[in-house]
Image (cartoon, rainbow, N blue to C red):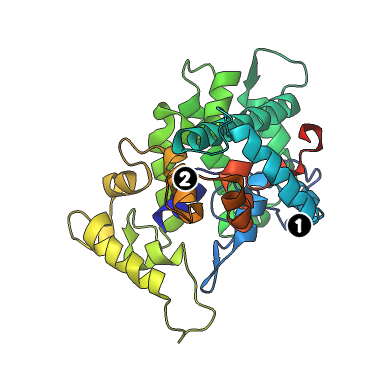
Amino acid sequence: MDFVWLTLMFGLVVAASAIPKPDDKHNPLEHDSAHKSHFDGEEHNTQYDHEAFLGEDEAKQFDTLSPEESKRRLGLIVDKIDDDKDGFINLSELKKWIQFTQRRYIDEDVGRMWKQHNTLNESSIHWEVYRHNVYGFLDELDPEELDREEHGISYKRMLARDRRRWGVADQDNDDKLTREEFTAFLHPEDHPTMRDIVIIETIEDIDKDKDGKVSVEEYIGDMYRSSEPDDQEPDWVIQERDSFAQHRDIDGDGFLDKEEVRAWIVPKDFDHAESEARHLLFEADENEDEKLTKEEVLDKYDLFVGSQATDFGEALARHDEF
């Protein structure tokens, strides 16, 4: 489960808000991290990954492709990953491709948001411009609506959270963000100077009783919710409880503090692309020769279209590449 959790913690989750707003395209929950259930009972909710990294419109576009067409496109992607054209994909090639999809996703997301909030194409975006675009509708709400919670988070708190993150990304303290700073604001997981804010926001998301630390029940509750009160926990949840006690809770006090959360979600020397490449290789390498043929990839079609190797399916929906 560590692999799945780390993938999602560093991802961008797009969630729709149920509170009416004048312009629904500016969604203050867009860059929050905890609005959809990752697991539905014991089953892994693959649609979570699908929509979180594609957005609902792109996910729907992918869903319209026939399995035959999807597999055809996946086969073409395999040919691209195979740099040396030897008919096999090795760990290095797979890691390189995943790094490419990560960079492409971030570049395109930042480009879209930069254009949306910087219509005059200036060198930076002022906080007040961003606040007006995303949270301007709050000016028309009464105090009760401001404090109303959606998915457990109020818009008032989301505004404060974005304001704090903006301040951390603003390295020269001019209350404006250059494109590089704006990238750090939207994707703090990829910037060393933003790691502390990632830790703080993670704790805030999981820490339901707001005591500043994460209990084992909060840790489990963020990944798994039983459908019935008396449901027996699946084996992976029991394993996660053991992992919490044996590996996460370093001082053995029954809680995760800031540094223990840091060690959990931002481990030293952790290479996300290599971790995912190893995961995919392990799952698909039927003959255990530490490399993949096109046939092995296509045999694990469901695994790859739900992985970052295809931008969680997005690459399969790019008509201009095929």
Q: Residue furthest top?
A: 123
Identity of the residue furthest to the bottom in this view: 230
Residue type (three-letter) at the residue carrying disc 2: Glu
Q: In this rendering, is residue 155 above or below 42?
A: above
At x 40%, y 66%, the residue is 220
- Which image quarter holds the C terminus? top right
Q: Residue 273 in the image: x percent, y percent? A: 47, 38
Q: Position of residue 254 (x, y in %)?
A: 24, 63
Mark 1, mark 2: which one is toward the viewer? 1
Q: Residues within 10 Å of mark 1 (few under 14, many from 20)?
A: few
Q: Earlier in the sequence, mark 1 or mark 2?
A: 1
Question: In which quadrant will I find the N terminus?
Answer: bottom left
Q: Position of residue 276 (x, y in %)?
A: 47, 45
Element under disc 1: helix
Question: What residue is shown at x 32% (from left), y 55% (from top)?
Answer: 213
* Residue appearing at x 54%, y 54% in the figure: 34
Q: Name the residue beneath numbered marker 1.
A: 67
